[in-house]
Image (spheres, coloured by chain):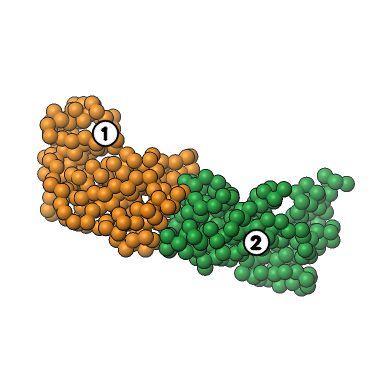
């Protein structure tokens, strides 16, 4: 029964209709859930035929529980992410994921894995030469012509604006809380006020949201 | 304490009589330079009744009440601005630097949305002694400039931007967290403050 399909687990009503409406299964936001709850929800989604089911912001204990329950799961502890029932999906277009500081890489990696699981080709470029601005035009040209670029940066250092001034596609700014005062807030505000048009912004540390949005933009250009 | 470096008053909505009174009070403090800020033409004229030699920068509304100093030789203070809308704040810095007798080199409209414009200004960056970098919105320019030079860089965030720029707080926060060592910032729209800092560094 489309439109009403969900499974009532008591503590959760799992949206089994999500694939029909949105093309991808519901993702599990693990923060605040016990490992047992996450595994139950995952079993519901996978049991309903979901592939590339994402479990985000997962603790080590939750990742261990998922690994035990789903031996074929793809787990990335650094990105705190699990991809359950991994499957090859038709791939199209390309999403580039850019960062310049190692501190931003875990969130950048989450974004990269999400876009990858959804079906974008993903290229990680985690060492942007922002410390030498004269190199940025050439380096950015090396990104080729992606369908979308994700820029992860936790500083007010303007990486998203600089990159957006050098590419044709949409830039998804991904502010991170890594390091410094005002963790993420300054980067969020700076990106929100970008002087370069074509910059859209997701919330601080929301690599999942960035990867999802970038994939949709990339798909849109491919269709 | 020695003489004050600079004194100033906001012209704002002061009556012309208040302007004359305020100008007299500023001059009585015997500062190295005295200014009236954000004055319209009528308030400038009122100031001139007290100080006939006062000069006026119409773009920023800065009235310089103290006599111009001869411009010193040596490397200039560079004043860069990101967008044309940042011009008034940058011009306030330029006018104040002139009041201090510091040599100025002005580079307008080199925002990072077109990075090559800034890269083409490299010679100015190389010869500047201090750089004042004026930018609103994302406040991106100061951090990029600070990565292109080993000279002191002073960010001047401006209140230019859409709603969630919060009157310049976004650009100020960006400058505070730029991750470029050696970058400092003034308050929002404070071109005069940046010029006074340059004077303190170079006098």
Q: Are marks 1 and 2 on the same chain?
A: no
Can you tell which chain is drawn orange? B
* Residue B194 on image: x %, y %: 28, 50
Say which residue appears at 17% left-offset and 47% top-offset.
Answer: B100
* Residue A80 on image: x %, y %: 64, 66
Residue at the extreme right of the image, as rendered? A1
Report in which chain the residue with disc 1 lies.
B
* Residue A209 on image: x %, y %: 63, 54
- Which class describes the residues within 10 Å of circle 2: few (<14), some (14-19), or many (20+)? many
Residue at label 1?
B58
Say which residue appears at 15% left-offset and 35% top-offset.
Answer: B54
Residue at label 2?
A122
- In what element is the residue under mark 2? strand
Q: Nearer the viewer, mark 1 or mark 2?
A: 2
Left or right of A109: which side holds A181?
Answer: left
Say which residue appears at 48% left-offset and 57% top-offset.
Answer: A137
User: Which shade of the palette goes to chain A?
Assistant: green
In this rendered view, identify the residue nearer to me: A105 or B170: A105
Q: Quadrant of residue A48?
A: bottom right
Report in which chain the residue with disc 2 lies.
A
Q: Quadrant of residue B183?
A: bottom left
The quadrant in which the N terminus of chain B is found is bottom left
Q: How many marks?
A: 2
Is residue B176 among the parts visible in the rendering?
A: no
- In what element is the residue under mark 1? loop
Is residue B22 among the parts visible in the rendering?
A: yes
Q: CA distance from mark 1 to mark 2?
A: 52 Å
């Amino acid at each position: 029964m489309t439109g009403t399909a969900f499974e009532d687990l008591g503590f959760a009503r799992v949206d089994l209709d999500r694939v029909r409406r949105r093309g991808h299964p519901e993702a599990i936001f693990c923060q605040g859930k016990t490992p047992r709850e996450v595994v139950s929800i995952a079993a519901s989604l996978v049991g309903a035929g979901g592939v590339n089911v994402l479990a985000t912001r997962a603790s080590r204990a939750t990742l261990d529980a998922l690994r035990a329950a789903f031996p074929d799961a793809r787990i990335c502890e650094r990105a705190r992410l699990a991809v359950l029932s991994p499957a090859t999906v038709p791939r199209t277009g390309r999403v580039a994921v850019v960062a310049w500081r190692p501190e931003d890489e875990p969130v950048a990696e989450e974004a990269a894995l999400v876009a990858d699981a959804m079906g974008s080709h993903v290229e990680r470029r985690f060492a942007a030469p922002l410390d030498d601005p004269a190199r940025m035009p050439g380096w950015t040209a090396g990104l080729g012509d992606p369908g979308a670029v994700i820029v992860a940066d936790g500083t007010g250092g303007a990486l998203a604006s600089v990159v957006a001034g050098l590419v044709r596609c949409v830039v998804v700014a991904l502010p991170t809380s890594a390091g410094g005062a005002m963790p993420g807030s300054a980067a969020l505000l700076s990106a929100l006020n970008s002087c370069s048009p074509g910059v859209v912004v997701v919330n601080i540390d929301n690599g999942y949201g960035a990867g999802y949005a970038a994939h949709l933009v990339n798909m849109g250009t491919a269709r | 304490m020695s003489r004050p470096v600079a004194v100033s008053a906001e012209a704002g909505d002061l009556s012309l009589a208040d302007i004359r009174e305020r100008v007299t009070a500023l001059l009585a403090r015997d500062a190295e330079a005295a200014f009236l800020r954000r004055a319209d033409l009528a308030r400038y004229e009122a100031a001139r009744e007290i100080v006939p030699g006062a000069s006026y920068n119409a773009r920023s509304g800065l009235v310089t009440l103290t006599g111009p100093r001869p411009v010193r030789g040596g490397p200039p203070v560079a004043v860069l601005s990101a967008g044309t809308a940042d011009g008034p704040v940058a011009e306030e810095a330029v006018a104040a630097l002139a009041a201090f007798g510091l040599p100025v080199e002005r580079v307008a409209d080199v925002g990072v949305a077109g990075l090559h414009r800034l890269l083409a200004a490299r010679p100015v960056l190389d010869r500047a002694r201090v750089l004042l970098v004026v930018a609103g919105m994302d406040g991106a320019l100061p951090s990029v400039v600070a990565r292109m030079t080993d000279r002191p860089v002073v960010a001047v965030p401006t209140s230019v931007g859409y709603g969630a720029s919060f009157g310049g707080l976004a650009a100020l926060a960006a400058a505070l967290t730029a991750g470029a060592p050696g970058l400092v910032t003034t308050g929002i729209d404070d071109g005069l403050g940046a010029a006074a800092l340059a004077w303190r560094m170079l006098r």
